[in-house]
Amino acid sequence: MIKRLSLLPAVLVAATTLAFVTSPLLVPDFGGFDPDLFPVPQRDAPVQPAGYAFAIWGVIYLWLLVSAGFGLFARARAADWMPMRPALALSVGIGAAWLPVAMVSPLGATALIWIMWATAMVALLRTPEHDRLLARAPVGLYAGWLTAASCVSVGLVLAGYGITGQTTAAILALLLALALSVATLRFAGNFPEFGFSVVWALIAITVAGWDDATVVTWLAATGAGLVAGVTLAASRRA
């Protein structure tokens, strides 16, 4: 009985990760929040990254799936893998339901993605020191993208519900993303994959607004450079 229970966390992570990775099959045409779901329709919002940026999900899905499989078959009872598993299972388990919610409720999806982010960050901070490429790296990439995506959602909600204008909402969202990212990289540990995800998102926001070159564009570009520098500094310290 004890041996069976010790397998449960690894099985749970594998099952929820599989559900998460296959969830796009339920919503194959999702291309972001429907602009008309907001009281103030969000078309061409400056906080939105260029479409190519979402290709990172393919890497995230595959890497998390490989990690879950390795954890199940090679590290099922490894003591140093256990601490991250409850939070990771909760994060990807919620993620499996995120797309259907996002199709009908941006506000509900924003609430869910912040829970996904918080639990992913807990999992990241509890990842094992060894097996980096199969534990810390995929969780870091996932948590980094969620950091950017959750802040983008905040920007869309602020503007979409008429709380601020689009430019102000985008600036606030970017400042929040930068604060969370720099704090994580500066004080929490050496997570280069986390930093890469955030930089990827910020560059995509820069590319999306390059033709207009607004303050949002320049803030995103500056932020990308800042996060990249802090990521390199953290790696050197490590």
Image: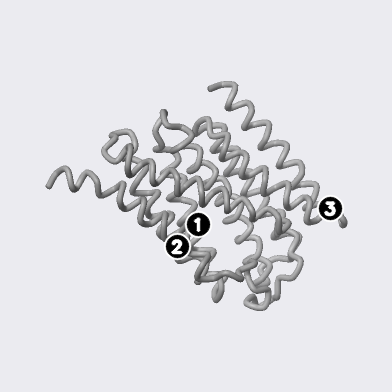
Separation (CA) of disc 1 from disc 3: 28 Å
Mark positioned earlier in the residue sequence (1 or 3): 1
> In this image, 67 relative to 185: left or right?
left
- Residue 217 visible from this viewpoint: yes
Farthest-out residue, top? 237
Q: Secondary structure at mark 1?
A: helix
Amino acid type, label 1: Trp
Q: Position of residue 158 (x, y in %)?
A: 64, 65
Which dot marks residue 114?
1
Query: What residue is drawn where x is 45% and y is 41%?
Result: 124
Query: What residue is drawn where x is 31% and y is 46%?
Result: 10
Residues at circles 2 and 3 in contact by the CB criterion of under 8 Å: no
> In this image, 6 relative to 134: left or right?
left
Which dot marks residue 4?
none
Q: Secondary structure at mark 3?
A: loop
How busy is the neighbourhood of tag 2: few (under 14 within 10 Å), some, or many (20 plus)? many
Q: Which is more toward the observer, 180 or 71?
A: 71
Q: How many marks?
A: 3
Q: Position of residue 81 (x, y in %)?
A: 34, 37
Q: Quadrant of residue 195?
A: top right
Mark positioned earlier in the residue sequence (1 or 2): 2
Amino acid type, label 3: Trp
Q: Position of residue 133 (x, y in %)?
A: 48, 34
Q: Position of residue 211 (x, y in %)?
A: 87, 56
Seen in the picture, residue 91 relative to 234 is either above or below; the reply is: below
Which dot marks residue 96?
2
> In this image, 99 relative to 75: left or right?
right
Q: Secondary structure at mark 2?
A: helix
Q: Which residue is mark 3?
A: 210
Query: What residue is drawn where x is 55% and y is 76%?
Result: 104
Q: Quadrant of residue 224?
A: top right
Q: Nearer the viewer, mark 1 or mark 2?
A: 2
